[in-house]
């Protein structure tokens, strides 16, 4: 077995964490809390390392002798200004919240625009393949959701039958989000079990 000591430490930490969750005994509970604090600390350090690596990559792209990447300069400048504002104003300051919001909202809007273009290209390729019922169902669902999202049916929302249909359709994204969360939970549970059993050792390098 590769890295037996690391495997034993990982399995032991996982078992102690589970025991502290299901068996509220004081020594195990305190040790579980300490392990969770260490895990959060390591996650924070890993985040800082990732940020430093990202900045170093964009710095190399910006200072390259050939084919300099201009967007990397904008990223570095934006990061420096945001970091300086966070250090001066602190994260909970209203002005800092406005700065973060004005940066985050355009980024999310751009990602949604890229997603819309990607879905449009996928729809065109789906129709080119002529997959029969799949193309028809995709076209009908896209048309229905576009009509509902455009607000054309807002004036008819008081009709009893139509009101129930619109409520059911509007609940579909919530159901999809719950399905994604359930999938993430099952994947995390499976990964945790593989680490506990020693079959998956991502720490062994």
Image (cartoon, rainbow, N blue to C red):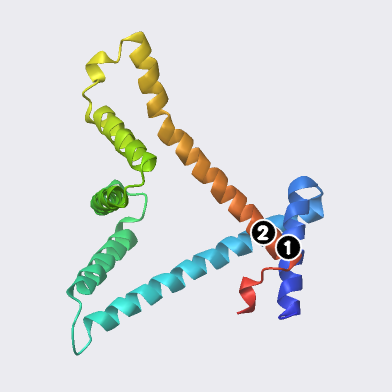
How far from the left and from the top, in percent, is residue 88? 30, 60
Residue 152 occupies quadrant: top left
Q: Which residue is mark 2?
A: 192
Q: Is residue 89 above or below residue 60?
A: above
Tell me the quadrant of the picture where the C terminus can be found. Answer: bottom right
- Numbered marks: total: 2
Badge 1 marks a residue whose secondary structure is helix
Give 118 or 185, whichever is nearer the viewer: 118
In the visual, does 42 lie left or right of 154? right
Dot 1 crowding, Cα within 10 Å, few <14, some 14–19, many 20+: many
For residue 28, say whether it is visible: yes
Q: Percent x, y for residue 57? A: 33, 79
In the picture, the quarter occupied by the N terminus is bottom right
Label 2 CA crowd tier, 10 Å (few <14, some 14–19, many 20+): some
Are the residues flagged by discs 2 and 1 in contact, CB closer than 8 Å?
A: yes
> Residue drawn 65% across and 53% down?
189
Q: Which residue is mark 1?
A: 196
Left or right of 6 on screen, residue 151: left
Where 146 falls versus 113 (above or below)?
above
Q: Could you give the CA–CA distance between mark 2 and mark 1, rounded to whole angstroms? A: 6 Å
Q: x, y percentage for residue 31?
A: 74, 59
Is residue 29 at all visible to an observer of this figure?
Answer: no
Residue 169 lies in quadrant: top left
Depicted 159 relative to depicted 42: above or below: above
Residue projecting furthest to the bottom: 65
Q: Residue at x 33, y 42 (%)?
A: 135
In-front residue for pair 95/17: 17
For label 2, the SS is helix
Depth check: give the residue in front, 120 or 153. Answer: 120
- Which image quadrant is residue 36 in? bottom right
């Amino acid at each position: 077995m590769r890295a037996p000591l690391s495997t034993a430490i990982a399995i032991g930490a996982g078992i102690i964490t589970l025991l502290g969750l299901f068996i509220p005994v004081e020594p195990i509970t305190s040790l579980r809390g300490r392990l969770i604090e260490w895990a959060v600390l390591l996650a924070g350090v890993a985040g800082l390392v990732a940020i430093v690596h990202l900045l170093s990559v964009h710095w190399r792209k910006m200072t390259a002798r050939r084919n300099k990447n201009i967007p990397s300069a904008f990223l570095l400048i934006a990061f420096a200004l945001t970091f300086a504002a966070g250090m001066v104003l602190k994260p909970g300051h209203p002005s800092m919240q406005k700065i973060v919001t004005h940066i985050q909202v355009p980024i999310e809007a751009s990602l949604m625009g890229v997603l819309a273009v990607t879905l449009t290209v996928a729809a065109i390729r789906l129709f080119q393949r002529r997959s029969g019922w799949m193309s028809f169902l995709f076209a009908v669902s896209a048309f229905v959701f576009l009509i509902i999202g455009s607000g054309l049916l807002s004036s008819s929302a008081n009709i009893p039958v139509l009101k129930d249909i619109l409520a059911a359709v509007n609940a579909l994204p919530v159901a999809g989000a719950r399905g994604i969360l359930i999938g993430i939970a099952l994947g995390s549970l499976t990964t945790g079990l593989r680490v506990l059993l020693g079959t998956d050792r991502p720490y062994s390098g």
